[in-house]
């Protein structure tokens, strides 16, 4: 789950990381009022679940409340990477002497959280990572002990030469690690971590991604979810208890079990197609889930064919068949449906489907090939 910068900076601030003051506005009027309250120069920042806002024109400095109002008005009408900007953060503008990058991700290769830090932070960090990876220092963290003081200090010395700034940064790195663990994050980063001309170290941007699997035990973090910033199909899937991820292709996939869903997507790719989604209807069989799944898949205008791939174990094929029949009566589906099912109550399922005018296959390869052909408009 993504959260906004203003939420992430609240989490950091609660852990002691120095972040500038600031408030969120949804209108230009409000932005002007906040700027007036803050006094002096302010920065207006788009709050969307996307990086690269600076380069997209979503971060602007304003000298006066009037200018803050104008920038806020413009930014609130923008889309950044396809996401509408509904809120802006208004914060006092800092004078910047240097911009560093500090972040933690869960690294699958090292099976541990890994810190990454670089002196060359700011809006070009992706380019630094691509062209000069040696400018980024990495430090895996043993989750049993957390970031040890000497590790924090060592990372801090690679960021700053001044001893006071090294101390400040070492403290911030440990606070960042605590924020990362406490919020159940899979990523937490500060970019830029700035120094001001009078030597202070501050977090001017904050990004935290939460591991969805942590949310059930962290209701206060779940409460930060902003459905208006998420894909509507993903919101609907979550409410229906389905695991769904929207992708860019045209073969809508409806599968039971995450492993089979992955294998199905692999096979779609193998035969030259492109999956429109990952969808796991789960282990239990409930026709209602199939109805919801079909609603979600068909709401994507890019879908040109729907492929069911069901391996009946606990999931009963006849339940899925009933779900398909019910759903197609309730929703108007104008794309072909390819159905493959095998396993528990397979014969009964085929009977139900054939009575309703569908045909069912048992071979996964054949079904995927057919779906890919249909998506390409090749008929067979
Ligand atoms: P991002 O582009 O989405 O990562 O947004 P950031 O919040 O990191 O802002 C992008 C850039 O805007 C930063 O790297 C800074 O160079 C600049 N910036 C952000 N806040 C301030 C500020 O308070 N003062 C100044 N001078 N520049 C800022
Ligand atoms: Mn940034």
Image (cartoon, rainbow, N blue to C red):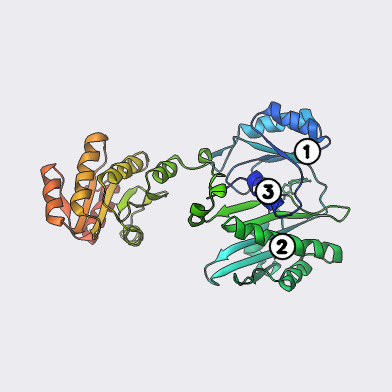
3D distance between C-alphas at marks 1 and 3: 17 Å
Circle on res. 371: none
Circle on res. 9: 3
* Residue at horizontal 83 percent and vertical 34 percent from the top: 39
Q: Picture quarter containing residue 93?
A: top right
Circle on res. 42: 1
Within 10 Å of the Cα at label 1, are there few (<14), some (14-19), or many (20+) other Cα atoms?
many
Question: Helix, strand, or loop for circle 1?
Answer: strand
Residue farthest to the top, as pictured:
29
* Residue at horizontal 43 percent and vertical 45 percent from the top: 234
351 displayed left or right of 29: left
* Residue at horizontal 17 percent and vertical 52 percent from the top: 360
Counting the numbered discs, the total is 3
Say which of marks 2 and 1 sits in front.
Answer: 2
Q: x%, y% of residue 91?
A: 75, 40
3D distance between C-alphas at marks 2 and 3: 14 Å
Residue marked by disc 2: 173
Question: Helix, strand, or loop for circle 3?
Answer: helix
């Amino acid at each position: 789950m993504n959260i906004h910068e203003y939420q992430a900076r609240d989490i950091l601030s609660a852990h002691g990381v120095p972040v500038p003051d600031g408030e969120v506005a949804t209108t230009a009027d409000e932005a002007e009022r906040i700027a007036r309250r803050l006094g002096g120069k302010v920065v207006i920042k788009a709050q969307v679940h996307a990086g690269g806002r600076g380069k997209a024109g979503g971060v602007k400095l304003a000298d006066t409340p009037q200018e803050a109002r104008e920038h806020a008005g413009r930014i609130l009408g923008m889309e950044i990477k396809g996401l509408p900007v509904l809120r802006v953060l208004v914060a006092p503008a800092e004078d910047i002497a240097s911009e560093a990058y500090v972040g933690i991700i869960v690294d699958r290769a090292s099976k541990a959280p890994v810190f990454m830090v670089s002196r060359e932070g700011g809006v070009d960090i992706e380019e630094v990572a691509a062209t000069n990876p040696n400018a980024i220092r990495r430090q895996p963290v043993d989750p049993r002990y957390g970031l040890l003081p000497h590790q924090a200090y060592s990372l801090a010395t690679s960021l700053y030469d001044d001893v006071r700034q090294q101390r400040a940064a070492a403290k911030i790195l440990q606070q960042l690690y605590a924020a990362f663990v406490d919020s159940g994050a899979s990523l937490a980063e500060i970019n830029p971590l700035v120094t001001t001309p009078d030597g202070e170290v501050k977090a001017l941007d904050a990004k935290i991604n939460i591991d969805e699997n942590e949310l059930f035990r962290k209701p206060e973090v779940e409460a930060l979810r902003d459905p208006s910033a998420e894909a509507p199909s993903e919101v609907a899937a979550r409410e229906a208890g389905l695991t769904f991820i929207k992708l860019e292709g045209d073969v809508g996939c409806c599968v039971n079990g995450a492993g089979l869903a992955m294998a199905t997507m692999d096979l779609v790719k193998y035969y030259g197609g492109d999956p429109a989604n990952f969808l796991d209807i789960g282990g239990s069989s409930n026709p209602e889930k199939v109805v919801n799944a079909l609603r979600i898949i068909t709401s994507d205008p890019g879908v040109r064919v729907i492929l069911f791939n069901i391996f009946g174990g606990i999931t009963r094929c006849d339940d899925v068949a009933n779900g398909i029949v019910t759903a197609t009566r309730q929703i108007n589906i104008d794309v072909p449906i390819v159905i493959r099912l095998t396993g528990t109550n397979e014969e009964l399922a085929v009977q139900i489907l054939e009575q309703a005018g569908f045909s069912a296959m048992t071979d996964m390869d054949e079904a995927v090939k057919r779906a890919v052909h249909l998506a390409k408009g090749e008929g067979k």
